[in-house]
């Protein structure tokens, strides 16, 4: 039976754009794998502790690493907060990124695992926009997960999520709605594709 490791980090509960997209992915995955397993961590409601002097050999750290190593697919909600990832996600990464085991090894222990990252953001950082070059989410996560850990990473990027609530962005609402629809479709398509690979 296939196992999905699902991690959410948004602080915004039911109003979260990233959670809505990860939920669409997960619902599709579970529909395709009714007998499968989902390991779920909500790092906003139940954050893992930041590493301290004793954290490198903790039981929790081993549990988190094993959850990653045994997953058939990984799903991560990574909203942009102040141009970067939530600190709760960084804490989780600090636990699971182990040089010589999950990273920077001849064969990282979770290498090849398909990993879908929903990188939502309130504005747009696409080429040609005023904020181009100020996205410190995708490049960082791509380097950590793909380059160092060897995961098979794909990003889904719902953008302009603040348009409905910020008057100055009102004219961007149609673009937000288009991005939201595309993100949900991409999540469902990706989930079906990965589920079929583990049927």
Image (tube, rainbow, N blue to C red):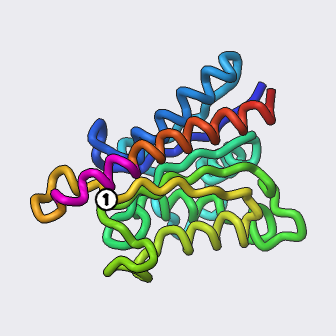
Kindly indicate the quadrant of the structure image that contains residue 145. bottom right
- The answer to whether 110 appears left or right of 169 in the picture is right
Q: Which secondary structure type mostly characterizes the magenta part of the structure?
A: helix
159 and 15: which is toward the camera: 159
Left or right, 127 with reference to 155: left
Is 46 rendered above or below residue 122?
A: above
Residue 154 in picture, x, y percent from top left:
63, 56
Q: Secondary structure at mark 1?
A: loop
- 56 or 67, nearer to the observer: 67
Residue at 16% x, 57% y is 170
Judged from this view, the residue extending furthest toward the left is 167
Q: Residue at x 88, y 64 (%)?
A: 107
Task: Tell me where residue 184 appears, x and y as whole percent.
Answer: 47, 40
Query: Counting other residues with Cα less than 10 Å from the Cα at mark 1, is it few (<14), some (14-19), or many (20 or more)?
Result: many
Outermost residue on the right side: it is 106
Q: Quadrant of the N terminus?
A: top right
The tally of labels here is: 1
For the record, the magenta segment spans 170-179
Quadrant the C terminus occupies: top right
Residue 189 painted magenta: no
Instruction: Identify the residue at horizontal 47%, vertical 46% (top origin).
Output: 182
Q: Is residue 155 shown left or right of residue 158?
A: right
Q: Is residue 117 above or below residue 35?
A: below
Q: Nearer the viewer, residue 140 or 104?
A: 140
Locate residue 185, reporting x and y percent: 52, 39
**Residue indicated by mark 1:** 160
State the image quarter where residue 87 is shown: bottom left
Report the residue at 40% width, 79% height from top.
128
| x and y, in percent, of residue 53 in the image | 54, 70
């Amino acid at each position: 039976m296939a196992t999905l490791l699902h991690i959410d980090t948004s602080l915004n509960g039911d109003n979260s754009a990233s959670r809505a997209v990860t939920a669409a992915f997960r619902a599709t995955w579970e529909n395709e794998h009714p007998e499968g397993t989902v390991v779920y961590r909500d790092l906003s409601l139940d954050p893992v502790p930041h590493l301290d002097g004793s954290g490198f050999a903790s039981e929790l750290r081993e549990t988190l690493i094993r959850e990653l190593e045994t997953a058939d697919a990984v799903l991560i909600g990574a909203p942009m907060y102040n141009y970067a990832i939530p600190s709760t996600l960084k804490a989780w990464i600090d636990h699971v990124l182990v040089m010589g085991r999950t990273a920077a090894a001849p064969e990282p222990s979770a290498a090849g695992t398909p990993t879908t990252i929903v990188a939502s953001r309130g504005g747009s950082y696409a080429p040609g926009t005023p904020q181009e070059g100020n996205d410190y989410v995708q490049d960082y996560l791509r380097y950590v997960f793909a380059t160092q850990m060897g995961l098979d990473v794909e990003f889904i990027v719902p953008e302009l999520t603040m348009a409905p609530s910020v008057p100055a962005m009102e004219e961007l609402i149609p673009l937000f709605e288009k991005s939201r629809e595309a993100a949900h479709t991409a999540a469902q398509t990706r989930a079906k594709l990965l589920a079929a690979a583990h049927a």
